[in-house]
Amino acid sequence: MKYDITITKTTTPKAKPDPATLEFGTVFTDHMFIMDYDEGPGWHDARILPYGPITLDPAAAVLHYAQEMFEGLKTYLTKDGGVQLFRPDMNAKRTNRTNDRICIPQIDETFYVDAIKELVRIDKDWVPGAEGTSLYIRPFIFASEPFLGVRPALQYKFVIILSPVGPYYKGGLAPTKIFVEDEYVRAAVGGTGQSKIGGNYAMSLKSQVKAHELGFAQVLWLDGNERKYVEEIGTSNAFFVMDGEVWTAPLSGTILPGITRDSTLQLLRDWGVPVREERFTIQDIADAHADGRLTEVFASGTAAVISPVGELRWVDKDMIINNNEIGPLSRKLYDTITGIQSGELPDTHGWVVKL
Ligand SMILES: *Cc1c(COP(=O)(O)O)cnc(C)c1O
């Protein structure tokens, strides 16, 4: 390992939650990882500590100008009691691409994965085993330098926390209702749509609240220029099955390059299902729906893995997809990806990393 990690274990371990009542992101484990960055030494002082508050100067740059990035991945308990990660190298790579976009210093990708593994090893007993549960890993980096001028900070903290989670949607694989956002936008060409940063989420909340008030689970984002091209769904990438082909927006800078999206495309290609990573409009979707050519819609992301869409509302048009039932591709993708993640299916692509 490139850097040594100093370990201080808690003397007051917490009680583990009941796996049956786990929600998303409400309970945290006994330990956390922290590492500092200062100009000169670079990244240094990697340490694992008892989970707890972080002291920040009120002038810390992140609190004023939002120089912050985050990642999300999961670790699973296998039937034989092993613990495994899913494609953590992809999160490390995406971290550095995000860092580059918002001027956070690069981080050693091998060390990044090692730090995750070391923390998970220490809190291994927190990985839940019940169906649909996992240990969610949240690495994040923020500008901690106390300075109110606008420029890239000279000090950062890289932190990893862990949270045992249940299924993301309370209804499990039940199809969701999605509101097509025709007022607010998430990303513009040349902006930060492809970066996993807190700022992208702060400005999405207004729209999410609106969708919730109207009875929808999430929003579908259209492009920031014409509000015409389909981009993604909330915190996940969006897939549409039309005429037996699977369509998803291309990675042209405004879309978050999801690791579940990449895995989904790979599996579809393995299965010989035609995929189209091309631009398409919400009108194309409405037309296909009207003609009965739109057979399935689903979202992909770490939190929910594959989430079928049962209904799309676009202005005054309500489109019911596949009778509001889970489609065969959504089901097969969900079963295959979660099967690989939990070790029940063979890992033919080398996606699994055992602890
Ligand atoms: C994280 C994220 C995704 C999904 O990425 P995964 O790597 O599959 O979890 C999709 N869209 C947005 C906006 C995201 O932040």
Image (cartoon, rainbow, N blue to C red):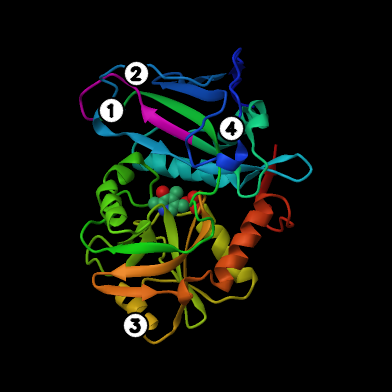
On whether residue 146 falls in the magenta region, the answer is: yes
Q: Secondary structure at mark 1?
A: helix
Which label's residue is closer to the chain start, 1 or 2?
Answer: 2
Q: Residue type at mark 3? A: Asp
Q: Residue 340: give x, y in percent of width and height.
A: 68, 54
Which label's residue is closer to the chain start, 2 or 3?
Answer: 2
- For the residues labelled 1 and 4, the Cα–Cα distance comes to 32 Å
Q: Secondary structure at mark 2?
A: loop
The nearer-to-camera label among 2 and 4 is: 4
Q: Which residue is mark 4?
A: 17
Query: Is the N terminus in the top left, top right, bottom left or bottom right quadrant?
Result: top right
Q: Residue placed at 65% from the left, 51% from the top? A: 341
The nearer-to-camera label among 1 and 4 is: 4
Q: Is residue 271 above or below residue 164?
A: below
- For residue 56, the mark is 2
Q: Residue type at mark 4? A: Pro
Q: Residue 291: give x, y in percent of width and height.
A: 39, 87
Q: Residue 225: give x, y in percent of width and height.
A: 22, 63
For the view shown, which residue lies furthest in the right direction? Answer: 80
